[in-house]
């Protein structure tokens, strides 16, 4: 039987997200099979092949008491997990069974984003992070944030892997994607992807629709409730708004960017991690890696967008119309610049090799 890795996820929907895809692919490439643990335990991982299995875990004291002492944990060569809750379990298992622990710090739940878990539970999570032989964060600016939050030693091993697929999926058919949703073939199309709320620029999207009469908007909005859908369908300019009816898979969402001309990347929250988004942003990586220039909220970690001229940084919704017009006027060059930026700055493929080799060193496999 091949040696196995137990990788703990916060929710099943993240099983195929770009950072977890990178983690699973790295473990597999190193010769380890992988068990993905998440609440519920029933989620589809068939895209990874037969060496990856879904398993159930809950992140609370009751589950730990019932499952901490079990022979199955002896089968694992290491425990890895995403932040925050999974690291309480991964770290504890690592200590009890004397196995290496790896933290994938995709979220840093501090400040106003601390959540509602108790101080005692969060202390267990941070203990798991401190027990890690390796910590992966998703943006250079977040290295000190994670070091401070988790209380890592100054010499703790850390590296950066972005919120990006190491190999972007093949782009879809632009004309077919547009025709299936009723977009005009020649329309200027802005895509809003992910959760929609005030902090992620929901009002900025509405302003773009109102202020740009020639602009069409594609809402790939996750978990869209009926009330919000109904309000969006009554916006000024709603005849140029198309809301995706079903949640697209991670791979399909990326492939669908062949139909888009502009991406929206807005973070208004005041929590530390949101002030340092950079290449941690899945949506930003998706747009640029698929050749889609972006309109992004201004913050230092996004300044590379202007350096590469692959988008426009704006300070508020009142600037959306001008940003849309600038991208429209320079769209072919900005498309090419987006791909250059992904290749030279995000560097997902190169960073994945660094990630794989670092994981290998943790277990002496490289």
Image (cartoon, rainbow, N blue to C red):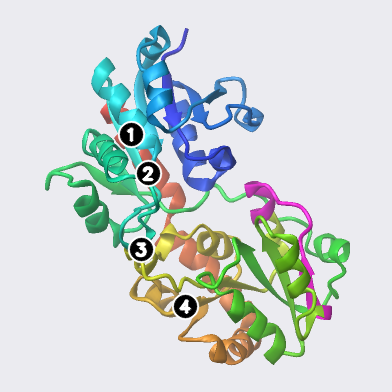
Dividing the picture into quadrants, the one containing residue 121 is top left
Instruction: Check if mark 2's residue and mark 4's residue have beta carbons within 8 Å.
Output: no
Q: Position of residue 32 (x, y in %)?
A: 44, 21
Mark 1 in CB contact with mark 2 (< 8 angstroms): yes
- The residue wearing badge 3 is 112
Circle on res. 297: 4
Provide the residue span drawn in magenta: 239-254
> Which residue is more in the foreground, 356 or 253?
253
x, y percent for residue 70: 39, 10
Disc 2 secondary structure class: loop
Q: Quick one: label 3 or label 2, which is nearer the N terminus?
A: 2
Where is residue 75? Give x, y as percent: 40, 11
The secondary structure type at the circle numbered 1 is helix
The image shows residue 51 at horizontal and vertical percentages of: 55, 20
Q: Which residue is mark 1?
A: 88
Measured in 3D between alpha carbons, the distance from the residue under mark 1 to the one under mark 2, in whole angstroms, is: 8 Å
């Amino acid at each position: 039987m091949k040696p196995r890795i137990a990788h703990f996820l916060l929710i099943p929907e993240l099983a195929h997200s770009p950072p977890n895809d990178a983690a699973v692919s790295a473990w597999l490439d190193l010769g380890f099979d992988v068990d993905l643990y998440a609440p519920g335990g029933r989620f589809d991982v068939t895209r990874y092949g037969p060496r990856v299995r879904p398993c159930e875990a809950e992140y609370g004291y009751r589950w730990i008491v019932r499952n901490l002492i079990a022979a199955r944990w002896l089968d694992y060569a290491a425990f890895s997990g995403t932040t925050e809750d999974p690291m309480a379990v991964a770290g504890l298992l690592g200590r009890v069974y004397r196995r290496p622990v790896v933290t994938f710090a995709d979220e840093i739940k501090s400040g106003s984003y601390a959540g509602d878990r108790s101080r005692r539970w969060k202390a267990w999570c941070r203990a798991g992070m401190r027990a890690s032989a390796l910590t992966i964060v998703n943006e250079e600016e977040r290295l000190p944030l994670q070091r401070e939050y988790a209380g890592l030693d100054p010499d703790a091993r850390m590296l950066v892997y972005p919120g990006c697929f190491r190999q972007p999926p093949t782009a879809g058919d632009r004309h077919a994607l547009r025709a299936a949703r009723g977009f005009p073939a020649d329309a200027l199309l802005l895509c809003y992807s992910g959760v929609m709320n005030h902090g992620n620029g929901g009002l900025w999207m509405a302003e773009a629709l109102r202020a740009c009469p020639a602009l069409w908007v594609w809402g790939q909005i996750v978990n869209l409730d009926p009330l919000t859908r109904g309000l969006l369908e009554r916006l000024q300019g709603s005849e140029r708004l198309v809301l995706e009816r079903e949640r697209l898979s991670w791979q399909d969402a990326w492939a669908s960017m062949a139909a888009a001309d502009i991406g929206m990347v807005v973070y208004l929250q005041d929590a530390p991690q949101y002030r340092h988004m950079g290449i941690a942003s899945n949506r930003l990586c998706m747009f640029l890696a698929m050749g889609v220039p972006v309109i992004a909220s201004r913050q230092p970690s996004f300044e590379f967008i202007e350096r590469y001229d692959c988008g426009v940084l704006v300070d508020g919704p009142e600037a959306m119309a001008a940003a849309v017009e600038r991208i429209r006027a320079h769209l072919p060059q900005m498309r090419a610049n987006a791909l250059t930026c992904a290749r030279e700055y995000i560097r997902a493929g190169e960073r994945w090799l660094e990630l794989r080799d670092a994981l290998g060193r943790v277990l002496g496999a490289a």
